[in-house]
Amino acid sequence: MRMPDGVTSTIVLVPDSLKSYWLEGGPGTLLSTPDFSANLLVPSGAAKSSSAAAAWKYTLSDSRVGNLRFEPEAIPGIIIPKELWLNPANHTYDGDGHVDSIPLGFSFNFYGNTYDKVNVYANGFLQFGAPQTDPAGAGFFKGAFIASAALPNNIVAFAWTDWSPQLVDGGVRFETRGTAPNRRFLLQFNNVPEYSSKGTAPGLLMMQLVLEEGTNVITIYTNVLKITISGQRITQGIENADGTQAVVDSVFNPLNGVTSARVANFFSLTNDVVRFTPPRPPVVTVVPKDTTVATAPPATTAQRQALGVLPALGSCVAAFSPTGATATDDVGVVSLVGVRSDDPTLALDAPYPKGVTTITWTATDTDGMTASETQTVTVVDKENPWISAPADASADNDPHLPSAVVAVGSAQSADNCPGVKVSSARSDDPTLALDAPYKVGLTTITWTATDGSGNSASATQSVKVRDVEAPSLTVPLNITVSATSPSGAVVNYQLFATDNVAVTSLSCTKLSGATFPIGPTSVRCTAADAAGNSTVGTFDVMVYDAPTQMQNLLKYVRGLGMQEGTTNPLVNQLLAAYDDASYDHGCKKMSDFINMVGKKDSGIPPGSASYMTSQATQICAVMACPTARAKPQFPGSNGTSF
């Protein structure tokens, strides 16, 4: 495994003469060890930090008491190269340094502060936060007293004394193992010798430090800790960031029967286990975790009448009194307080607004440690809005149009919660604006009030447009036709009718294409629309009888201006037929007229002979005469027929 990115090293050059002054001045005697009780050492008169760390009281356990067993893990895989402990100028170990910003791989809480990197010092301790330098320039080569404001602080001293890791390949190793949320950071000093060791059995450190994710437990497994320089001192324990708190174990000297603290002391360890367990915060339990309540319902009818409040509307809040929050702790709970997210100053049983309100329950124990749990109160609005549509509207159609512009007004709405919106839709076309013309007939407007929660209510309004405009009708002028049979004549005519909406019926007393009788006929026509409006028009049809047609034919013949020899015979035949239009005489004379036209053809203008023949034939038909035919003419003197 390779070193992670971002790891740096610092070399502290400490002259050997300085170390010799302290270490070779004789065995020396221990300074008085501060009193300790329950493995918690705080110097007399020291003020506790105002930070969260002041509440952290670690519990110490070791392999001598309890069931801790010496069970270190396999050797870590990442080696801190020994070159990082060497003087870069000459590659010799002239001082006491540290390797910084080694990633833990997870967040670790130490005395109430959270870290994700550590600094490892050659002289047997691990430090959190910004790297610290010995102000005396001595590189922290001698284990000192803790707790103390003197540097270093914020440390885990697993074997704080003067070591030489540069002398061993793979002497310092680390690794992060496991998976979240139960990872472990391992740091191991592997057969690291004591600085300037004396005697045939050199001083040696074989130790594994374990930091646990989640529990924040610190465990030191010491396989071998031995120093030979009697002037040296060892410290093993933990200390907070400002040096006001520390926890250390004790060591028993079997030679003199004295138990003393592992602080600036001279001792050795074999297969020793020390564990520092941080305090546990309270446990907050909220039942139910999440609650949903509805907004307050409307007042009763009697209540509304008494208050003069109409329409019936509820409120946009809900009454709720949270219960069921409890807290437990291993030392004792001092307080359990709930704070609302909508307004921290409001009482917990004050009405809750629509939406989600989070109550944060915080428990504080006698150590000052806190823990929080949240509870949500969701207020839902299930109440439909109130809406009243405008009064129904009606209007006459606009002139010559099938519609009318109608002012329909506006709907009124109200809701228990603000933000209600009103929309409208027309039954004839939902896309049309309300001020667009309304067609003749009935249109329904649906007014809908919708609130912010999606609740809705609807009301309808009717808009009636009356068609009061009658159709326009054009009838023909009076018609005169000649009868074509004794029954009269077929008469065709055209009518023109229009309406602002539509003409639904058009009728006449005598339809076009019918046979009209001889004589005058009055025709009455009616155009009507669906609304019952109607228009009447009349005209007369005159069907000429046979005598009248004879008179007309006489005028025609006389009007041609032919020679008397041609005109007179023709006129005489017509006059004879007119004077006695009885069946026998009249038919015979009209037949004679047709024959005379044939005889006088040469004196008749082109086309007139055929016209006179057709008119005479029609008169014969009206008189119900046998079919009249012109007799064939044979050439002879003076064109006389034989």
Image (cartoon, rainbow, N blue to C red):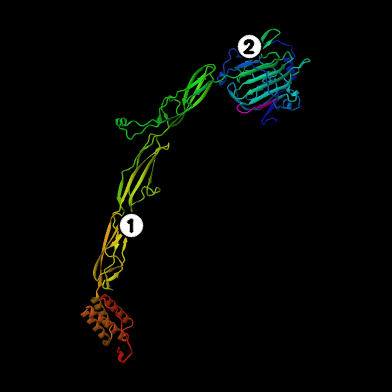
**Mark 1 in CB contact with mark 2 (< 8 angstroms):** no
Residue 47: where, in percent of width, then height?
Answer: 57, 16
Q: Nearer the viewer, residue 575 or 198?
A: 575
On the rendered structure, is 333 left or right of 86?
left
Residue 584: where, in percent of width, then height?
Answer: 23, 80
Q: Residue at x 38, y 34 (%)?
A: 416
Q: Nearer the viewer, residue 45 or 328?
A: 328
Label 2: which secondary element: loop
The amino acid beneath tag 1 is Ala
Label 1: which secondary element: loop
Residue 334: where, in percent of width, then height?
Answer: 50, 17
- Looking at this view, name the residue that lies furthest to the bottom: 637
Q: Is residue 214 above or below residue 557?
A: above
Q: How many marks?
A: 2
The tag on residue 34 is: 2
Find residue 17 and report its image quarter.
Answer: top right
- Residue 127 in sight in this render: no
Mark 1 against mark 2, which lies toward the viewer? 1
Image: magenta residue range: 173-181
Q: Is residue 240 above or below residue 105?
A: above
13 inside magenta stretch? no
On the rendered structure, is 451 left or right of 21?
left
CA gap, disc 1 and disc 2: 114 Å
- Residue 455 in sight in this render: yes
The tag on residue 502 is: 1
Q: Residue at x 31, y 43 (%)?
A: 391
The amino acid beneath tag 2 is Pro
Which comes before the other along the chain, label 1 or label 2?
A: 2
